[in-house]
Image (cartoon, rainbow, N blue to C red):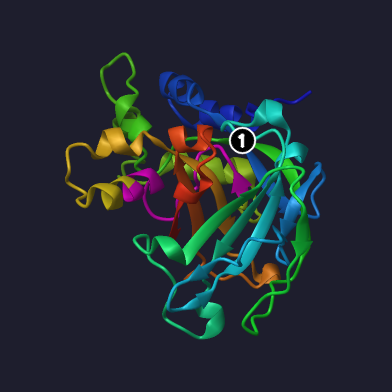
């Protein structure tokens, strides 16, 4: 049986110095890629209508209106042996976001607009009712999501690339700083993209696939109020990827210029099931 990490490990050995490849491979984490019409188990749905507890109000961004429902993930259907984050054994995660682009508005939330997105966890056994989208909004086209285990790894300015060192004392970031003709190239990001192939990057757990820079750095800087805060590295290390939703034309989801939505959460909040503390940010080209 082929391991989830084999393809990325092989590419790393082919294109990186042996010690760099080996050190980077030690950092790999499995992620659950959420693929419409995939070959793995059905683990949820993108688009359509959410099933919410009867007494729970549809999430809103105060002053703007109801959030758009993006996706649902069935925790019980996930391949738990490949989860890199401690999700509940059962229950449903629902992801909401205020899609300003779809409404012809410039009001899409920034990272600091914490009420412009929401993660709702519905425990198993709680009675639910499928809701119609309020406020005249059209739901996104509904499609089932299938789980495929993929290799994820730190890339694009992730703190682990600076903290992990080889025998020479160089960090991984220094040791793989791109070819001489193109210094600063994100070699690690290119290897990850090659290993995963073409397709949407909807994903649960693992490392984020950043469009710009490390998502953890962005979250930490917002929490601390200053990117130059010396506590930023420590704060960034506290955050893990809960989920990411890629731009997806077939789902009518467009995040800026071919961008990505990321829901990040502190590891201790995830352990305590405090999904309301997840933070959402958008990166695009």
**Outermost residue, top side:** 167
Q: 201 or 22: which is nearer to us?
A: 201
Task: Name above or below for residue 252 compared with residue 167.
Answer: below
Image point 69% across, 72% down: which residue? Answer: 140
Q: In which quarter of the image is the C terminus?
A: bottom left
Lateral position of residue 254 relative to residue 237, left or right: right
Lateral position of residue 1 relative to residue 112, left or right: right
Task: Name above or below for residue 191 compared with residue 122.
Answer: above
Q: Give the range drawn in magenta.
A: 203-219
Task: Name above or below for residue 96 compared with residue 23.
Answer: below
Q: In which quarter of the image is residue 4?
A: top right
Q: 173 or 113: which is nearer to us?
A: 113
Give the percent coordinates (x, y) of residue 32: 65, 40
Image point 52% across, 70% down: which residue? Answer: 60
Residue 285 visible in image: no
Name the residue beneath numbered marker 1.
87
């Amino acid at each position: 049986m082929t391991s989830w990490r084999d393809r990325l490990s092989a590419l790393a050995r082919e294109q990186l110095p042996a010690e760099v490849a080996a050190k980077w491979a030690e950092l790999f984490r499995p992620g659950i890629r959420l693929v419409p019409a995939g070959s793995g188990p059905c683990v949820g749905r993108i688009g359509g209508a959410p099933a919410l507890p009867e007494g729970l109000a549809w999430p809103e961004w105060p002053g703007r209106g109801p959030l758009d429902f993006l996706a649902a993930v069935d925790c019980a259907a996930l391949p738990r042996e490949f989860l890199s984050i401690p999700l509940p054994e059962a229950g449903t995660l629902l992801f909401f976001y205020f899609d300003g682009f779809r409404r012809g508005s410039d009001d899409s939330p920034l990272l600091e607009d914490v009420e412009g997105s929401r993660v709702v966890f519905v425990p198993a056994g709680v009675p639910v009712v499928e809701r119609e989208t309020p406020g005249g909004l059209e739901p996104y086209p509904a499609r089932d999501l299938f789980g495929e285990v993929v290799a994820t790894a730190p890339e694009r300015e992730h703190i682990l690339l600076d903290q992990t060192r080889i025998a020479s004392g160089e960090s991984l970031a220094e040791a793989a700083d791109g070819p001489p003709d193109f210094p600063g190239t994100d070699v690690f990001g290119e290897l990850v993209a090659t290993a995963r192939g073409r397709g949407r990057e909807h994903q649960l757990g693992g490392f984020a696939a950043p469009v710009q820079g490390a998502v953890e750095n962005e979250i930490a800087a917002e929490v601390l109020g200053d990117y130059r805060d010396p506590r930023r590295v420590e704060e960034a290390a506290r955050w893990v990827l809960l989920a990411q939703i890629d731009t997806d034309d077939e789902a009518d989801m467009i995040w800026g210029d071919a961008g990505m939505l990321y829901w990040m959460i502190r590891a201790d909040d995830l352990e305590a099931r405090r999904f309301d503390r997840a933070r959402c940010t958008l990166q695009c080209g």
